[in-house]
Image: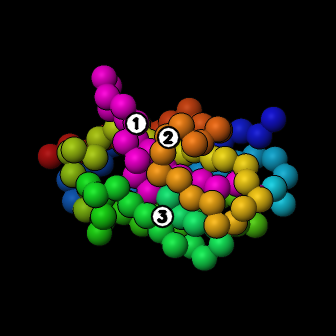
Amino acid sequence: QAQVVESGGRLVQTGDSLRLSCTVSGRTDTPYHMGWFRQVPGQEHEFVATIRRSDETTYYGDSVKGRFTISRENTKNTAYLQMNNLRPEDTAVYFCAATLTYNLNWLSLKRDDYVLWGQGTHVTVYS
């Protein structure tokens, strides 16, 4: 059973940068589509970013556009989220999610389309 593991969350100050990492364990020749979501207590998961496997086209939530960058290493089923100019409202638990698909053009911004989820990594931004 493949597992998703995120890392990199910590306490940072407003304006700081942070890089989150995510890896789907298991066979690296199995193609997983990956995305990032975040959640604050009492709220639904918010879409943050995803990247199309075939051409690395990226999509971002409106609140993070221009500040966050998603990237991936397909050979390792690893994704990264570079977060710049962090704000207190970015404070959340960040989740990496993955779905196994051989359709390299597959893409989704919807939480329910992702099958595998990590435990989350906490990001706290103080002013």
Q: From mark 1 to mark 3, how far is it between C-alphas?
A: 18 Å
Q: Is residue 76 magenta?
A: no
Which residue is located at x 57 percent, y 58 percent?
107
Classify residue 38 by image quadrant: top left
Q: Is residue 74 left or right of residue 61?
A: right
Q: Which residue is mark 3?
A: 70
Front residue of this view, candidates 20 and 72: 72
Q: Position of residue 54 (x, y in %)?
A: 65, 72
> Dot 2: what SS?
helix
Q: What amino acid is labelled 3 in the image? A: Ile
Residue 76 can be seen, yes or no: no
Q: Mark 2–mark 1 contact, CB under 8 Å?
A: yes
Residue extending farthest top: 42
Which label number is shown at residue 111? 2
Q: Position of residue 27 (x, y in %)?
A: 84, 52
Q: What amino acid is labelled 2 in the image? A: Arg
